[in-house]
Amino acid sequence: MTVAPTMFAVRGILRGVLVCSLLALGSNSTVRSQEPFGQRPPVPFEDAGACPFEGCVYREWTAKAVVIVRVERRRDAPVSFSLQAGEKVTALTGVVVTLRPGRVEFRQPKTLNTSTKPIRIEPGQTLYLLTYQGEGFTKAWFNGALYRDVDASDFLNAVCDFQPDRCTGRVVERWQSEWWVNVRTRSGRLGWTNEPEKFDGKSAIGG
């Protein structure tokens, strides 16, 4: 998105940077929410089947480097096998696990569109960010409920990063998440890896 015609141009330019930031460790902020515990999302939040960026697709992927594949979806699970650069696998599905939700606060009342019903947020309330869905939409938790396709354009875009006064929402704490992918080799071996960044072929848009 450009500032005048649309905001889609800027979104397209920053897509890669945004995806990396969403899947990386968040900030070191230690600000704590004052909301009751029941208003916060359950963590870890496991989003089965999620493919966390625009154009993301589970299909044949090609390893770009050595990839460790484990027998189960756990960091301490035994290694099942490893892939070498150039090897192809079928990415069957995945799970995006939010280990720590992000937090957004608003300096004035704001209504956010979602795929179910609008969210009305008042100053002092917190929107919790979960899985990013691509194209400026995210799953989020508010007031004890999960919302899908939440329009994040008023707090997750370049305008907010460089001109925060133009946005009513501010990310006060980034999130921590990991993406596990279930892969199958051509010989039929199965396993889980949390190293999806080491594959080509994840995007139906740009490979």
Image (spheres, rainbow, N blue to C red):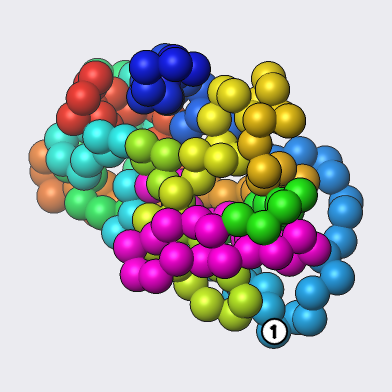
In this rendering, the count of numbered labels is 1
Look at the image and tell me in which quarter the C terminus lies: top left
Q: Is residue 131 left or right of residue 183?
A: right
Q: Residue furthest bottom?
A: 38
Q: Quadrant of the N terminus?
A: top left
Q: Would you identify the image quadrant in which residue 158 lies? A: top right
Callout 1: few (<14), some (14-19), or many (20+) C-alpha neighbours within 10 Å? Answer: few
Residue 105 in the image, given as x and y percentages of width and height: 73, 53
Residue designated by label 1: 38
The answer to whether residue 60 is above or below residue 95 is: above
Image position, residue 36 (x, y; %): 78, 81
The image quadrant that residue 186 belongs to is top left
Is 88 situated left or right of 164 in this image?
left
Position of 115 relative to 17 (above/below): below
Residue 39 x %, y %? 68, 78
- Taking 68 as reference, is 189 above or below it? below
Left or right for 85, reference 158: left
Q: Hey, what amino acid is under mark 1?
A: Gly
Secondary structure at numbered mark 1:
helix
Picture quadrant where residue 117 is located? bottom left
Q: Is residue 104 magenta?
A: no
In the depicted view, which residue is nearer to us: 6 or 68?
6
Of residues 29 and 179, the one drawn nearer to the viewer in this rendering: 29
Q: Nearer the viewer, residue 78 or 17?
A: 17
The answer to whether residue 19 shows anywhere in this view is yes
Decide if residue 98 is on the left or right side of residue 193.
right
Q: Which residues are magenta?
A: 111-133
Q: Is 131 inside the magenta-drawn segment?
A: yes
